[in-house]
Image (cartoon, rainbow, N blue to C red):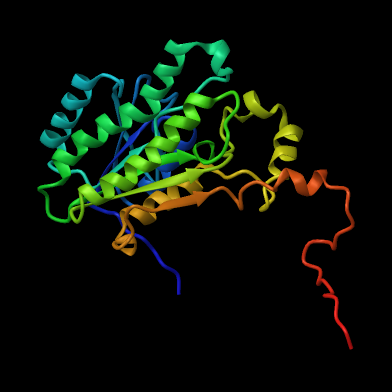
Amino acid sequence: MAVTIDLAGRVAVVTGGTRGVGAGITRALLHAGAEVVICARRPPDKPIEVDGRTARFESLDIRDVDAVAAFFAGLRRSHGRLDLLVNNAGGSPYGLIAEAGQRRAARIVELNLIAPMTVSLSAYELMRHQEGGGSIVMIGSVSGTRPSPGTGPYGAAKAGLENLARTLAVEWAPAIRVNTLVLGMVRTELSHLHYGDEEGIAAVGRTVPLGRMAEPVEAGDACVFLASGLAGYISGASIAIHGGGERPAFLDAANVNRPAPGAGRAEPRED
């Protein structure tokens, strides 16, 4: 039997919901029936619309504490409630820590860790007194769980974000559930900047056990699930959306004879 998640009547906010992963999350929530407000510094190239329903855009720099407070005060007046917050806004340019410098590193940590905490605190004030509480989803990264050369401050911030989610899940229970989606490589409209042409994108995708990068809407589907009653007992969790992760490099570097994947292995025995 098919399971359909209906978020009609729910109000969701997606930070950085105008493109890439954020736009995929927005589309998934609209498809599930939620009323979605997206915020970013710049508007989307065109309105995000699904099934005749359009996400509402508001300009917001999530690093501006006063602007964040004003945004949620306006949301309280216009909608009266908030059921789901997706802290998606973030990112980092490439740069080795010693070359990028301290100020740049601090700005990256601010965007990817401090700002989501600021946004979550404002959402908490709106969610905690309402019937049914609310759900907060942090968009994390595998960069926070492994070395992240070239994006070190970003990886450190994402590691901190995951820990913050687990802590808030305890401090804000039982009214508010807080979880993290740990994303691997996702194919977006900017993938060519990182991986080159279609052949390069496909080659990188083949390094993932499932054979491809994730699509943005697949992160969105996980957000829909975490916003629903089906996830009513899930809080403080880190859910990996990475297609199986990364094949260990030593397996390809080791020059040994080994059975093909899935093949049985004979164990030594004495008759």
Asked whether residue 143 appears in the rendered view, the answer is yes
**Residue drawn at 85 percent across, 63 percent down:** 259
Q: How many marks?
A: 0
> Where is residue 99 shown, x and y percent of the image?
57, 11
> What is the quadrant of the N terminus in the image?
bottom left
Residue 245: x and y in percent read: 61, 48
Say left or right for 265 vs 177: right
Query: Residue at horizontal 69%, vertical 48%?
Result: 247
Q: Is residue 19 visible?
A: no
Most extreme residue toward the bottom is 271
Quarter the C terminus occupies: bottom right
Residue nearest the observer in this picture, 47 or 74: 74
Q: Is residue 115 left or right of residue 155?
A: left
Q: Residue at x 32, y 53 (%)?
A: 227
Residue lying furthest front in this view?
A: 270
229 vs 251: above or below: below
- The percent position of residue 158, horizontal first and vertical second, equals 44, 35
Answer with left or right where residue 68 lies relative to residue 247.
Answer: left
Quadrant of residue 127 within the rendered picture = top left
**Camera-side residue of 229 and 57:** 229
218 sits left or right of 31 in the view: right
User: Which corner quadrant of the image does residue 82 belong to?
Assistant: top left
| Whether residue 190 is situated above or below residue 144 in the rendered picture | above
Residue 63 location, x and y as percent? 30, 21
Which residue is pictured at 45% across the width and 52% down the height?
239
